Structures are given as C-alpha cells and as structure tokens.
C-alpha cells in the first residue's frame, strides 16, 4: 500500500514558530543588556580622561580638585559628552558620569556612575567605581568628596564596579 507524504501539519508548524519566538525573545533581551553595558563602557572611557588631571592636581596641591577647572579641564561638565553620556562632572575629586546622550538607552538616561579617588599608604591613587566597596588600604583624598553609589542597575555595571 502506498502512502503520500504531504509535508508538515499545522500543529508542527505552530510548535516551530513558538520555539523561534522564545529563542528570539531571549536573544533580544541579551542583546539589549550587552548594548547598555557598551554604553556604560563609553562613560568610563570618557571619565578616564579626567583621572590623570585629578591625580596631577592632588599631587601638586595636596588636596582633591574642587571642580573641573581646578583639575585643569574646561569648567563646563557638558564639554565632555558623547552619544551615551550627557556630562562628566568633578566634585572634590570625585568624577560623576551622567548618562543621557542622544543615543543612550532609555534604561540609563539620567542615571549616574561615580568614580572616587583613594590614596594608599604608598601614596598611589586607586579608584572606586559604582557600587564597589572601599579599596583595601585606601583613604579618601584630602578634601575629597564621599563616594556615591551608582544609580545604574548593577547588572549593567562592569564587574569592578559591582559590590
């Protein structure tokens, strides 16, 4: 006896479509997280440009610079901005990154990430990032501002900036 093979049934096609939908929803979520982490990385790269002037100002004066001008940068915080960062401010040595550039993801617009300098017993400067704890053997710079935890969700922060 001969049987004809007609292809897939409707239920088989619906199962395949459901599986593709589930996999794509997971992929989209993972990609958005990756995209936001890349935007946070841009902010940290922009803040890196402020670390050296802060360390130099502290070495020369013995106190943390009060603002961008005291660190030798332009006085306006919005002078340092990018596609995902709206400003990089300095408050008594602490670098505050505010996210919200023209291409920033909605999940981080208005959020901040702070980098705070600490001095070790060997007179080197180490940086505390986001929600991380106080660096071992570190003390705030003379005249330095207290650290502020990040308002960015912890899952978007680099590992060194988490608790």
Image (cartoon, grey):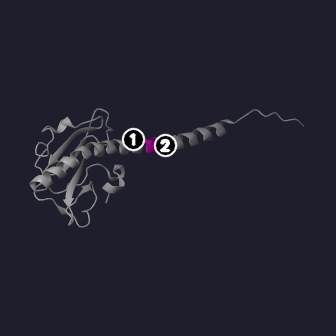
Residue most extreme to the front: 60
Residue most extreme to the right: 1
Name the residue located 10 percent from the left edge and 45 percent from the top edge. 70
**Dot 2 lies on which element?**
helix
Q: Which residues are magenta?
A: 27-32
Q: In the image shown, does 10 or 39 lie closer to the viewer?
A: 39
Q: What type of secondary structure mainly makes up the magenta span?
A: helix
Name the residue located 39 percent from the left edge and 41 percent from the top edge. 35
**Dot 1 lies on which element?**
helix
Name the residue located 15 percent from the left edge and 59 percent from the top edge. 141
Image quadrant holding the N terminus, namely: top right
Q: Is residue 45 above or below residue 126?
A: above
Between disc 1 and disc 2, the foreground one is 1
Q: In the image shown, does 105 or 2 lie closer to the viewer?
A: 105
Q: Position of residue 101 (x, y in %)?
A: 27, 35
Badge 1, how many Cα within 10 Å: few under 14, some, many 20+? Answer: some
Q: Position of residue 61 (x, y in %)?
A: 9, 53
Sequence-wise, the earlier of marks 1 and 2 is 2
Badge 2, how many Cα within 10 Å: few under 14, some, many 20+? Answer: few
Q: Position of residue 50 (x, y in %)?
A: 21, 45
Q: Position of residue 45 (x, y in %)?
A: 30, 44
């Amino acid at each position: 006896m001969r049987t004809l093979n007609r292809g897939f049934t409707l239920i088989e096609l619906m199962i395949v479509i459901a599986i593709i939908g589930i996999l794509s929803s997971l992929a989209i979520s993972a990609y958005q997280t990756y995209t936001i982490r890349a935007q946070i990385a841009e902010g940290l790269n922009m803040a890196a440009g402020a670390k050296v002037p802060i360390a130099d100002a502290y070495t020369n004066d013995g106190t943390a610079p009060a603002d961008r001008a005291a660190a030798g940068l332009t006085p306006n915080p919005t002078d340092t901005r990018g596609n995902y960062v709206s400003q990089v401010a300095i408050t008594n040595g602490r670098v505050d990154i505010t996210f919200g550039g023209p291409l920033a993801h909605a999940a981080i617009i208005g959020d901040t990430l702070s980098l705070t300098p600490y001095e070790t017993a060997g007179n080197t400067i180490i940086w505390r990032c986001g929600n991380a704890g106080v660096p071992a053997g570190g003390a705030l710079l003379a005249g330095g501002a207290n650290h502020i935890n990040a308002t960015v969700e912890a899952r978007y922060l680099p590992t060194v900036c988490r608790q």
